[in-house]
């Protein structure tokens, strides 16, 4: 079971810059979707690579794969700089770090429409509903197709 509270509080404590995306963003916008991981789009700067390593390092991040075998992996500044998207297992649950979001862009693009919400005593940026819908349509996985009608209905309700 993912411990959203501890992950978000640690990211906040170390002042990591990110936007909550994916399933948790859908839930924050009012979806009944159940998610078992934290998906974030992170700012790709040297300062933020260091903040992410400090925030998540003590939770022993390791690569998550189909067989979930132990794959050699060093979670550090250089790894984040050299890569883009990481699907990780931690002692607090699964977290996906995305440098770019399909259909929307990078952190700088998401921030433009992101909403600030309070989660577990922390001010967090959450992907806008418009961007969330756009991204889910672009990725078009089965699970995205299933939640899209609900997100679009929420969008209609919010518009009036």
Image (spheres, rainbow, N blue to C red):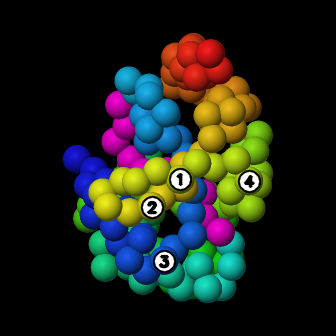
Q: Give the quadrant of residue 136.
A: top right
| Residue 68, percent from left and from top | 36, 53
Q: Residue at x 70, y 47 (%)?
A: 113
Q: Which residue is mark 3?
A: 15
Q: Residue at x 36, y 53 (%)?
A: 119
Q: Distance from label 3 to label 1 (Cα)?
A: 15 Å
Q: Is residue 30 visible?
A: yes
Q: Distance from label 2 to label 4 (Cα)?
A: 16 Å
Query: Front-most of 19 and 113?
Result: 113
Query: SS of the residue at dot 1?
Result: strand
Q: Which circle's residue, 2 or 3, is located before the other in the chain?
A: 3
Q: Which mark is residue 46?
A: none
Q: Residue at x 68, y 79 (%)?
A: 45
Q: Is residue 90 visible?
A: no
Numbered disc in front, either 2 or 3: 2
Quadrant where the C terminus sits is top right
Instruction: Assess whether mark 4 and mark 2 are in contact (beta carbons under 8 angstroms).
Output: no
Query: SS of the residue at dot 4?
Result: loop
Taking 83 as reference, is 96 above or below it? above
Q: Distance from label 2 to label 3 (Cα)?
A: 11 Å
Q: Which circle's residue, 2 or 4, is located before the other in the chain?
A: 4
Please provide the residue range marked out in magenta.
34-43
Q: Which residue is mark 4?
A: 112
Q: Which circle's residue, 3 or 4, is located before the other in the chain?
A: 3
Secondary structure mostly taken by the magenta-highlighted segment of the chain = strand
Q: Which residue is mark 2?
A: 123
């Amino acid at each position: 079971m993912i411990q959203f509270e501890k992950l978000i509080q640690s990211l906040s404590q170390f002042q990591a810059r990110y936007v909550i995306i994916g399933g948790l963003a859908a839930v924050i916008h009012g979806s009944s979707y159940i998610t078992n991981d934290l998906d974030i789009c992170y700012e790709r700067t040297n300062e933020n690579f260091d903040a992410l390593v400090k925030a998540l390092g003590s939770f022993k991040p390791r690569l998550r794969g189909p067989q979930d075998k132990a794959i050699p992996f060093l979670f550090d500044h250089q790894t984040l700089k050299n890569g883009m998207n990481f699907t990780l297992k931690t002692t607090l649950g699964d977290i996906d770090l995305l440098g770019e979001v399909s259909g929307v862009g990078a952190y700088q693009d998401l921030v433009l429409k992101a909403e600030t919400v309070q989660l577990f005593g922390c001010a967090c940026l959450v992907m806008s509903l418009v961007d969330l819908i756009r991204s889910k349509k672009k990725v078009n996985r089965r699970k995205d197709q299933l939640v899209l009608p609900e997100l679009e209905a929420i969008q209609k309700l919010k518009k009036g």
